[in-house]
Image (spheres, rainbow, N blue to C red):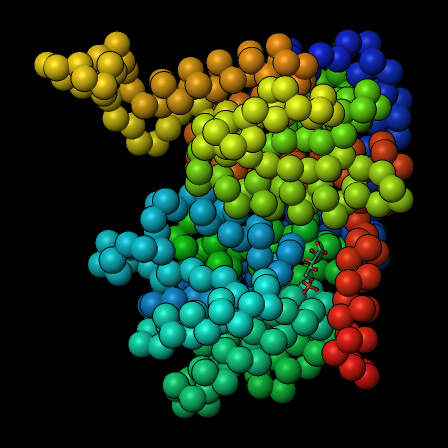
Protein backbone atom coordinates (compact mmCIF):
# COMPACT_ATOMS: atom_id res chain seq x y z
CA UNK A 1 0.00 0.00 0.00
CA UNK A 2 1.34 3.42 -1.00
CA UNK A 3 0.28 6.69 0.51
CA UNK A 4 -1.11 9.53 -1.56
CA UNK A 5 1.47 12.24 -2.22
CA UNK A 6 1.00 15.90 -2.99
CA UNK A 7 3.19 17.74 -5.46
CA UNK A 8 3.34 21.49 -4.89
CA UNK A 9 6.13 22.35 -7.31
CA UNK A 10 3.85 24.24 -9.71
CA UNK A 11 1.81 26.02 -7.04
CA UNK A 12 3.64 29.29 -7.66
CA UNK A 13 3.87 30.05 -3.98
CA UNK A 14 7.08 30.59 -2.03
CA UNK A 15 7.77 27.96 0.64
CA UNK A 16 8.32 30.76 3.15
CA UNK A 17 4.77 32.10 2.56
CA UNK A 18 3.44 28.67 3.42
CA UNK A 19 5.66 28.19 6.45
CA UNK A 20 4.48 31.50 7.93
CA UNK A 21 1.34 29.59 8.88
CA UNK A 22 3.21 27.06 11.03
CA UNK A 23 2.01 28.37 14.40
CA UNK A 24 -1.53 28.98 13.23
CA UNK A 25 -1.78 25.46 11.82
CA UNK A 26 -0.50 23.90 15.07
CA UNK A 27 -3.03 25.92 17.04
CA UNK A 28 -5.94 24.88 14.77
CA UNK A 29 -4.73 21.27 14.84
CA UNK A 30 -5.00 21.28 18.65
CA UNK A 31 -8.39 22.93 18.54
CA UNK A 32 -9.79 20.38 16.06
CA UNK A 33 -8.41 17.44 18.03
CA UNK A 34 -9.76 18.72 21.32
CA UNK A 35 -13.17 19.12 19.64
CA UNK A 36 -12.98 15.53 18.36
CA UNK A 37 -13.20 14.31 21.92
CA UNK A 38 -16.43 16.19 22.58
CA UNK A 39 -19.86 14.81 21.83
CA UNK A 40 -21.39 18.20 21.01
CA UNK A 41 -18.82 19.37 18.46
CA UNK A 42 -18.73 18.32 14.83
CA UNK A 43 -15.27 16.78 14.74
CA UNK A 44 -16.12 13.11 15.31
CA UNK A 45 -14.91 12.29 11.77
CA UNK A 46 -11.31 13.08 12.84
CA UNK A 47 -10.89 9.89 14.89
CA UNK A 48 -13.58 7.89 13.09
CA UNK A 49 -11.18 5.54 11.24
CA UNK A 50 -9.98 4.37 14.69
CA UNK A 51 -13.08 4.82 16.81
CA UNK A 52 -15.87 3.72 14.50
CA UNK A 53 -18.59 1.57 16.01
CA UNK A 54 -17.47 -1.98 15.21
CA UNK A 55 -20.87 -3.49 16.07
CA UNK A 56 -22.67 -1.11 13.74
CA UNK A 57 -20.05 -1.94 11.09
CA UNK A 58 -20.91 -5.66 11.28
CA UNK A 59 -24.61 -4.82 11.14
CA UNK A 60 -23.97 -2.82 7.97
CA UNK A 61 -22.25 -5.81 6.39
CA UNK A 62 -25.13 -8.13 7.34
CA UNK A 63 -27.75 -5.79 5.91
CA UNK A 64 -25.66 -5.34 2.77
CA UNK A 65 -25.57 -9.12 2.30
CA UNK A 66 -29.34 -9.35 2.69
CA UNK A 67 -29.91 -6.57 0.15
CA UNK A 68 -27.47 -8.23 -2.26
CA UNK A 69 -29.45 -11.46 -1.99
CA UNK A 70 -33.01 -10.17 -2.20
CA UNK A 71 -32.82 -7.04 -4.38
CA UNK A 72 -32.24 -6.07 -8.00
CA UNK A 73 -32.08 -2.41 -7.04
CA UNK A 74 -31.09 -0.46 -3.95
CA UNK A 75 -32.71 2.96 -3.90
CA UNK A 76 -30.53 5.40 -2.00
CA UNK A 77 -32.72 8.26 -0.80
CA UNK A 78 -30.77 11.27 0.43
CA UNK A 79 -29.43 14.68 -0.57
CA UNK A 80 -26.15 16.57 -0.13
CA UNK A 81 -23.88 14.92 2.39
CA UNK A 82 -26.42 12.15 2.77
CA UNK A 83 -25.76 10.66 -0.67
CA UNK A 84 -22.80 12.27 -2.40
CA UNK A 85 -20.14 10.35 -0.46
CA UNK A 86 -21.70 6.97 -1.19
CA UNK A 87 -22.12 7.82 -4.86
CA UNK A 88 -18.55 9.15 -5.07
CA UNK A 89 -17.07 5.93 -3.71
CA UNK A 90 -19.38 3.58 -5.59
CA UNK A 91 -18.86 5.21 -8.98
CA UNK A 92 -15.09 5.50 -8.47
CA UNK A 93 -14.69 1.84 -7.59
CA UNK A 94 -17.18 -0.05 -9.74
CA UNK A 95 -17.31 -0.67 -13.47
CA UNK A 96 -18.04 2.55 -15.40
CA UNK A 97 -21.25 0.94 -16.70
CA UNK A 98 -22.11 -0.89 -13.46
CA UNK A 99 -25.78 0.05 -13.41
CA UNK A 100 -26.15 -0.76 -17.12
CA UNK A 101 -24.55 -4.20 -16.95
CA UNK A 102 -26.68 -7.31 -17.25
CA UNK A 103 -27.66 -8.70 -13.86
CA UNK A 104 -25.65 -11.88 -14.56
CA UNK A 105 -22.48 -9.85 -15.10
CA UNK A 106 -22.98 -7.35 -12.30
CA UNK A 107 -24.21 -10.01 -9.82
CA UNK A 108 -25.04 -7.25 -7.33
CA UNK A 109 -27.95 -4.82 -7.07
CA UNK A 110 -28.05 -1.68 -9.15
CA UNK A 111 -27.63 1.39 -6.99
CA UNK A 112 -30.00 4.20 -7.94
CA UNK A 113 -30.34 7.57 -6.27
CA UNK A 114 -33.47 9.55 -5.55
CA UNK A 115 -34.55 12.25 -3.13
CA UNK A 116 -31.78 14.56 -4.32
CA UNK A 117 -34.04 16.69 -6.53
CA UNK A 118 -37.72 17.53 -6.92
CA UNK A 119 -38.10 16.65 -10.58
CA UNK A 120 -41.33 14.80 -11.36
CA UNK A 121 -39.74 13.49 -14.57
CA UNK A 122 -36.93 11.90 -12.60
CA UNK A 123 -39.29 10.28 -10.11
CA UNK A 124 -41.78 9.05 -12.70
CA UNK A 125 -39.03 7.61 -14.92
CA UNK A 126 -37.58 5.84 -11.89
CA UNK A 127 -40.98 4.44 -10.89
CA UNK A 128 -41.37 2.99 -14.39
CA UNK A 129 -37.84 1.64 -14.40
CA UNK A 130 -38.11 -0.26 -11.13
CA UNK A 131 -41.66 -1.53 -11.66
CA UNK A 132 -40.63 -5.13 -12.45
CA UNK A 133 -37.67 -5.24 -10.09
CA UNK A 134 -37.12 -6.31 -6.51
CA UNK A 135 -36.10 -3.28 -4.51
CA UNK A 136 -34.77 -2.23 -1.14
CA UNK A 137 -34.60 1.31 0.13
CA UNK A 138 -31.97 3.06 2.23
CA UNK A 139 -33.25 6.44 3.41
CA UNK A 140 -30.47 8.63 4.73
CA UNK A 141 -31.14 11.90 6.54
CA UNK A 142 -29.41 13.17 9.64
CA UNK A 143 -32.09 15.73 10.46
CA UNK A 144 -34.80 13.34 9.31
CA UNK A 145 -36.78 16.32 8.07
CA UNK A 146 -35.22 17.28 4.73
CA UNK A 147 -37.99 17.81 2.18
CA UNK A 148 -36.49 16.18 -0.93
CA UNK A 149 -35.72 12.78 0.64
CA UNK A 150 -38.89 12.88 2.74
CA UNK A 151 -41.04 13.27 -0.39
CA UNK A 152 -39.14 10.51 -2.21
CA UNK A 153 -39.52 8.18 0.77
CA UNK A 154 -43.25 8.78 0.98
CA UNK A 155 -43.62 7.90 -2.71
CA UNK A 156 -41.36 4.84 -2.77
CA UNK A 157 -42.55 3.49 0.58
CA UNK A 158 -46.06 3.31 -0.85
CA UNK A 159 -44.73 1.52 -3.93
CA UNK A 160 -42.95 -1.00 -1.72
CA UNK A 161 -46.01 -1.53 0.46
CA UNK A 162 -48.16 -2.17 -2.62
CA UNK A 163 -45.63 -4.55 -4.11
CA UNK A 164 -44.89 -6.69 -1.07
CA UNK A 165 -46.69 -7.64 2.12
CA UNK A 166 -46.44 -4.95 4.81
CA UNK A 167 -44.01 -7.18 6.70
CA UNK A 168 -41.76 -7.73 3.71
CA UNK A 169 -41.89 -4.05 2.76
CA UNK A 170 -40.72 -3.18 6.27
CA UNK A 171 -37.85 -5.64 5.95
CA UNK A 172 -36.71 -3.95 2.75
CA UNK A 173 -36.44 -0.49 4.30
CA UNK A 174 -33.22 0.66 5.98
CA UNK A 175 -33.06 3.99 7.77
CA UNK A 176 -29.88 5.93 8.48
CA UNK A 177 -30.56 8.88 10.77
CA UNK A 178 -29.97 10.55 14.10
CA UNK A 179 -29.95 8.42 17.25
CA UNK A 180 -32.81 10.30 18.91
CA UNK A 181 -34.56 13.01 16.94
CA UNK A 182 -36.32 13.76 13.66
CA UNK A 183 -39.46 12.63 11.86
CA UNK A 184 -37.58 9.79 10.20
CA UNK A 185 -36.44 8.43 13.55
CA UNK A 186 -40.04 8.46 14.76
CA UNK A 187 -41.23 6.67 11.64
CA UNK A 188 -38.43 4.09 11.90
CA UNK A 189 -39.36 3.40 15.51
CA UNK A 190 -43.04 3.04 14.74
CA UNK A 191 -42.53 0.76 11.73
CA UNK A 192 -39.59 -1.13 13.29
CA UNK A 193 -37.33 -0.54 10.31
CA UNK A 194 -33.67 -1.60 10.51
CA UNK A 195 -31.94 1.58 11.61
CA UNK A 196 -28.38 2.87 11.49
CA UNK A 197 -27.10 5.79 13.51
CA UNK A 198 -25.32 8.90 12.28
CA UNK A 199 -23.12 9.91 15.22
CA UNK A 200 -24.08 13.21 16.87
CA UNK A 201 -20.66 14.71 16.34
CA UNK A 202 -20.42 14.07 12.59
CA UNK A 203 -22.13 16.44 10.14
CA UNK A 204 -23.60 15.41 6.78
CA UNK A 205 -20.70 16.21 4.47
CA UNK A 206 -18.14 14.57 6.79
CA UNK A 207 -20.22 11.40 7.17
CA UNK A 208 -19.30 9.17 4.25
CA UNK A 209 -17.35 6.76 6.48
CA UNK A 210 -20.35 6.20 8.76
CA UNK A 211 -23.40 4.11 7.85
CA UNK A 212 -24.44 7.07 5.66
CA UNK A 213 -21.97 5.97 3.02
CA UNK A 214 -20.98 2.51 4.15
CA UNK A 215 -24.27 0.66 3.65
CA UNK A 216 -24.75 1.57 -0.03
CA UNK A 217 -21.01 1.20 -0.62
CA UNK A 218 -21.04 -2.32 0.86
CA UNK A 219 -24.11 -3.28 -1.20
CA UNK A 220 -22.11 -2.35 -4.32
CA UNK A 221 -19.56 -5.00 -3.30
CA UNK A 222 -16.83 -2.59 -2.23
CA UNK A 223 -14.50 -3.70 0.55
CA UNK A 224 -15.46 -1.32 3.38
CA UNK A 225 -12.74 -2.73 5.65
CA UNK A 226 -10.16 -1.61 3.11
CA UNK A 227 -11.86 1.79 2.79
CA UNK A 228 -11.58 2.29 6.56
CA UNK A 229 -7.99 1.02 6.52
CA UNK A 230 -7.10 3.65 3.93
CA UNK A 231 -8.76 6.35 6.04
CA UNK A 232 -6.90 5.11 9.13
CA UNK A 233 -3.64 5.19 7.20
CA UNK A 234 -4.34 8.83 6.35
CA UNK A 235 -5.42 9.59 9.92
CA UNK A 236 -2.00 8.43 11.14
CA UNK A 237 -0.10 10.09 8.35
CA UNK A 238 -1.70 13.51 8.82
CA UNK A 239 -1.65 13.53 12.60
CA UNK A 240 1.46 15.71 12.85
CA UNK A 241 0.67 19.28 13.86
CA UNK A 242 3.93 20.43 12.28
CA UNK A 243 3.12 21.97 8.94
CA UNK A 244 6.55 21.09 7.63
CA UNK A 245 5.75 17.37 7.79
CA UNK A 246 2.05 17.44 7.01
CA UNK A 247 1.14 17.54 3.29
CA UNK A 248 -2.55 17.73 4.06
CA UNK A 249 -2.09 20.92 6.06
CA UNK A 250 0.24 22.28 3.36
CA UNK A 251 -2.55 21.87 0.83
CA UNK A 252 -4.93 23.69 3.18
CA UNK A 253 -2.47 26.54 3.68
CA UNK A 254 -1.62 26.80 0.00
CA UNK A 255 -5.27 27.23 -0.87
CA UNK A 256 -5.44 30.15 1.51
CA UNK A 257 -2.21 31.71 0.24
CA UNK A 258 -3.54 31.46 -3.31
CA UNK A 259 -6.88 32.89 -2.20
CA UNK A 260 -5.09 35.91 -0.83
CA UNK A 261 -3.53 36.37 -4.24
CA UNK A 262 -7.04 36.61 -5.74
CA UNK A 263 -7.04 32.99 -6.88
CA UNK A 264 -10.54 32.43 -5.60
CA UNK A 265 -11.70 29.51 -7.75
CA UNK A 266 -10.26 26.03 -7.34
CA UNK A 267 -10.75 23.52 -10.11
CA UNK A 268 -10.49 19.92 -8.96
CA UNK A 269 -9.47 17.98 -12.03
CA UNK A 270 -9.59 14.31 -12.88
CA UNK A 271 -8.56 12.44 -16.00
CA UNK A 272 -10.75 9.51 -14.93
CA UNK A 273 -14.52 9.78 -15.60
CA UNK A 274 -15.21 7.33 -12.74
CA UNK A 275 -14.19 10.16 -10.40
CA UNK A 276 -17.04 12.44 -11.54
CA UNK A 277 -19.01 12.02 -8.33
CA UNK A 278 -15.91 12.18 -6.20
CA UNK A 279 -15.55 15.72 -7.51
CA UNK A 280 -19.23 16.38 -6.75
CA UNK A 281 -18.65 15.18 -3.17
CA UNK A 282 -15.56 17.39 -2.87
CA UNK A 283 -17.45 20.41 -4.23
CA UNK A 284 -20.10 19.99 -1.57
CA UNK A 285 -17.55 19.40 1.18
CA UNK A 286 -15.60 22.58 0.45
CA UNK A 287 -18.53 24.69 -0.80
CA UNK A 288 -20.68 24.21 2.29
CA UNK A 289 -17.75 24.33 4.66
CA UNK A 290 -16.04 27.49 3.42
CA UNK A 291 -18.54 29.59 1.51
CA UNK A 292 -19.83 31.90 4.22
CA UNK A 293 -19.47 35.41 5.60
CA UNK A 294 -18.82 36.58 2.00
CA UNK A 295 -15.64 34.52 1.95
CA UNK A 296 -14.37 31.28 0.47
CA UNK A 297 -12.77 29.70 -2.55
CA UNK A 298 -15.41 28.66 -5.08
CA UNK A 299 -15.01 24.88 -5.54
CA UNK A 300 -15.39 23.86 -9.10
CA UNK A 301 -14.59 20.65 -10.97
CA UNK A 302 -13.55 19.44 -14.38
CA UNK A 303 -13.02 16.16 -16.17
CA UNK A 304 -10.17 16.20 -18.62
CA UNK A 305 -9.63 15.70 -21.42
CA UNK A 306 -13.41 16.05 -21.96
CA UNK A 307 -13.64 19.55 -20.49
CA UNK A 308 -10.49 20.75 -22.21
CA UNK A 309 -12.83 21.02 -25.18
CA UNK A 310 -15.33 23.12 -23.25
CA UNK A 311 -13.61 24.90 -20.36
CA UNK A 312 -10.05 24.61 -21.68
CA UNK A 313 -10.10 27.97 -23.47
CA UNK A 314 -11.28 29.79 -20.33
CA UNK A 315 -8.76 28.06 -18.12
CA UNK A 316 -5.92 28.91 -20.49
CA UNK A 317 -6.81 32.52 -21.24
CA UNK A 318 -9.81 33.73 -19.26
CA UNK A 319 -9.81 35.71 -16.01
CA UNK A 320 -6.76 34.79 -13.98
CA UNK A 321 -8.50 33.91 -10.73
CA UNK A 322 -8.19 30.12 -10.96
CA UNK A 323 -5.95 27.47 -9.58
CA UNK A 324 -6.04 23.79 -10.35
CA UNK A 325 -5.74 20.68 -8.19
CA UNK A 326 -5.27 17.52 -10.21
CA UNK A 327 -5.97 14.04 -8.87
CA UNK A 328 -3.45 11.86 -10.69
CA UNK A 329 -4.15 8.14 -10.58
CA UNK A 330 -0.77 6.62 -11.34
CA UNK A 331 -1.81 3.14 -12.51
CA UNK A 332 -4.94 2.43 -14.48
CA UNK A 333 -6.64 -0.89 -13.56
CA UNK A 334 -7.28 -1.60 -17.22
CA UNK A 335 -5.41 -0.55 -20.31
CA UNK A 336 -5.05 -1.11 -24.03
CA UNK A 337 -2.37 -0.47 -26.59
CA UNK A 338 -2.73 1.15 -29.99
CA UNK A 339 -1.81 -1.00 -32.96
CA UNK A 340 -0.22 -0.03 -36.24
CA UNK A 341 -2.40 0.15 -39.37
CA UNK A 342 -0.98 -0.53 -42.82
CA UNK A 343 -2.55 2.61 -44.24
CA UNK A 344 -2.06 5.41 -41.74
CA UNK A 345 -5.14 7.30 -42.87
CA UNK A 346 -5.88 8.73 -39.42
CA UNK A 347 -2.20 9.63 -38.89
CA UNK A 348 -2.08 7.77 -35.61
CA UNK A 349 0.73 5.33 -36.37
CA UNK A 350 3.10 7.50 -34.35
CA UNK A 351 1.23 6.14 -31.32
CA UNK A 352 1.90 2.50 -32.23
CA UNK A 353 2.62 0.46 -29.13
CA UNK A 354 1.59 3.26 -26.80
CA UNK A 355 -0.98 2.48 -24.12
CA UNK A 356 -4.04 4.66 -23.60
CA UNK A 357 -2.99 5.31 -20.00
CA UNK A 358 0.37 6.61 -21.31
CA UNK A 359 -1.40 8.91 -23.77
CA UNK A 360 -3.77 10.12 -21.03
CA UNK A 361 -0.74 10.84 -18.82
CA UNK A 362 0.96 12.85 -21.55
CA UNK A 363 -2.27 14.83 -21.99
CA UNK A 364 -2.15 15.55 -18.27
CA UNK A 365 1.49 16.61 -18.30
CA UNK A 366 1.01 18.80 -21.37
CA UNK A 367 -2.07 20.42 -19.86
CA UNK A 368 -0.39 21.15 -16.54
CA UNK A 369 2.52 22.86 -18.31
CA UNK A 370 0.15 24.88 -20.50
CA UNK A 371 -2.02 25.98 -17.59
CA UNK A 372 0.93 26.83 -15.34
CA UNK A 373 2.42 28.87 -18.20
CA UNK A 374 -0.94 30.59 -18.44
CA UNK A 375 -0.72 31.59 -14.75
CA UNK A 376 -2.96 28.87 -13.32
CA UNK A 377 -1.11 27.57 -10.26
CA UNK A 378 -1.20 23.81 -10.02
CA UNK A 379 -1.18 21.20 -7.27
CA UNK A 380 -1.09 17.47 -8.04
CA UNK A 381 -2.40 14.81 -5.68
CA UNK A 382 -0.81 11.52 -6.73
CA UNK A 383 -2.52 8.29 -5.82
CA UNK A 384 -1.20 4.89 -6.78
CA UNK A 385 -4.43 3.36 -8.06
CA UNK A 386 -8.17 3.55 -7.83
CA UNK A 387 -9.01 1.14 -5.02
CA UNK A 388 -10.85 1.25 -1.70
CA UNK A 389 -7.70 1.93 0.30
CA UNK A 390 -6.64 4.91 -1.80
CA UNK A 391 -10.15 6.35 -1.87
CA UNK A 392 -10.29 6.00 1.94
CA UNK A 393 -7.06 7.96 2.16
CA UNK A 394 -8.30 10.61 -0.23
CA UNK A 395 -11.56 11.07 1.68
CA UNK A 396 -9.75 11.61 4.96
CA UNK A 397 -7.18 13.88 3.31
CA UNK A 398 -9.87 16.19 1.93
CA UNK A 399 -12.01 16.20 5.08
CA UNK A 400 -9.03 17.21 7.20
CA UNK A 401 -7.77 19.73 4.64
CA UNK A 402 -11.24 21.24 4.44
CA UNK A 403 -11.54 21.69 8.20
CA UNK A 404 -8.04 23.18 8.41
CA UNK A 405 -8.58 25.44 5.41
CA UNK A 406 -11.93 26.73 6.71
CA UNK A 407 -10.43 27.48 10.10
CA UNK A 408 -7.52 29.35 8.49
CA UNK A 409 -10.04 31.35 6.48
CA UNK A 410 -11.78 32.22 9.75
CA UNK A 411 -15.15 30.55 9.14
CA UNK A 412 -16.90 27.67 10.88
CA UNK A 413 -16.35 24.72 8.52
CA UNK A 414 -19.04 22.63 10.19
CA UNK A 415 -22.22 24.66 9.76
CA UNK A 416 -24.28 25.65 6.70
CA UNK A 417 -26.58 28.52 7.75
CA UNK A 418 -27.02 29.74 4.17
CA UNK A 419 -28.75 26.54 3.07
CA UNK A 420 -31.80 27.46 5.17
CA UNK A 421 -32.59 30.54 3.07
CA UNK A 422 -34.12 28.74 0.08
CA UNK A 423 -35.98 26.37 2.40
CA UNK A 424 -37.64 29.24 4.29
CA UNK A 425 -38.85 30.81 1.05
CA UNK A 426 -39.99 27.50 -0.41
CA UNK A 427 -41.91 26.56 2.75
CA UNK A 428 -43.60 29.97 2.78
CA UNK A 429 -44.62 29.57 -0.85
CA UNK A 430 -45.90 26.07 -0.17
CA UNK A 431 -47.83 27.11 2.95
CA UNK A 432 -45.96 24.86 5.39
CA UNK A 433 -47.32 25.37 8.90
CA UNK A 434 -45.31 22.98 11.06
O1 LIG B 1 -23.46 18.50 4.78
C1 LIG B 1 -24.56 18.72 5.19
O2 LIG B 1 -24.80 18.87 6.41
C2 LIG B 1 -25.74 18.80 4.25
O3 LIG B 1 -25.34 18.74 2.92
C3 LIG B 1 -26.72 17.68 4.52
O4 LIG B 1 -26.08 16.45 4.34
C4 LIG B 1 -27.93 17.76 3.59
O5 LIG B 1 -28.52 19.02 3.68
C5 LIG B 1 -28.95 16.69 3.94
O6 LIG B 1 -29.34 16.82 5.26
P1 LIG B 1 -30.02 15.64 6.05
O7 LIG B 1 -29.07 14.53 6.14
O8 LIG B 1 -30.37 16.21 7.38
O9 LIG B 1 -31.26 15.25 5.27
Instruction: Choose between 169 and 130: the one closer to the eye.
Output: 130
**Residue 415 spot, x, y in % from top left:** 81, 52
Q: Is residue 258 visible?
A: yes
**Residue 243 spot, x, y in % from top left:** 77, 20
Instruction: Choose between 35 and 143: the one closer to the eye.
Output: 143
Left or right: where 91 falls relative to 415: left
Tally the numbered discs. Answer: 0
* Quarter of the rendering containing residue 324: top right
Question: Residue at the spot x=79%, y=43% of the render?
Answer: 291
Q: In the rendered view, would you say 428 is above or below 211? A: below
**Residue 142 spot, x, y in % from top left:** 69, 65
- In what quadrant does ligand 1 lie? bottom right
Q: In the rendered view, would you say 7 is above or below 388? A: above
Quarter of the image with the C terminus in it: bottom right
Q: In the rendered view, would you say 36 is above or below 401? A: below
Q: Is residue 239 visible?
A: no
Farthest-out residue, left:
342
Question: Residue at the spot x=50%, y=78% of the render?
Answer: 156
Question: Residue at the spot x=37%, y=70% of the render?
Answer: 129
Left or right: where 355 falls relative to 275: left
Instruction: Choose between 180 and 124: the one closer to the eye.
Output: 124
Q: In the rendered view, would you say 394 is above or below 373? A: below
Instruction: Choose between 134 and 433: the one closer to the eye.
Output: 433
**Residue 213 spot, x, y in % from top left:** 56, 55
Question: Residue at the spot x=56%, y=13% of the render?
Answer: 370
Left or right: where 395 falls relative to 58: right
Amino acid sequence: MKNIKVDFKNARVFEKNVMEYTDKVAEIHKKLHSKAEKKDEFCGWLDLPTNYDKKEFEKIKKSAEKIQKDSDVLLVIGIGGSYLGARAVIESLTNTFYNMQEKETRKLPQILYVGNNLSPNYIMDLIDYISDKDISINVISKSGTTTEPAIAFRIFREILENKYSLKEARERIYITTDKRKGALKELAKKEKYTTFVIPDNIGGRYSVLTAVGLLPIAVAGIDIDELMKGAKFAQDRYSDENLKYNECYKYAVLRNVLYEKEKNIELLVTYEPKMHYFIEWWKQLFGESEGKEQKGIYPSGAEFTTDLHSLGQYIQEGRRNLFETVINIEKSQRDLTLKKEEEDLDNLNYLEGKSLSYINKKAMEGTITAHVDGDVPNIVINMEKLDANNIGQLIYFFELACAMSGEILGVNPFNQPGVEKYKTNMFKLLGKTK
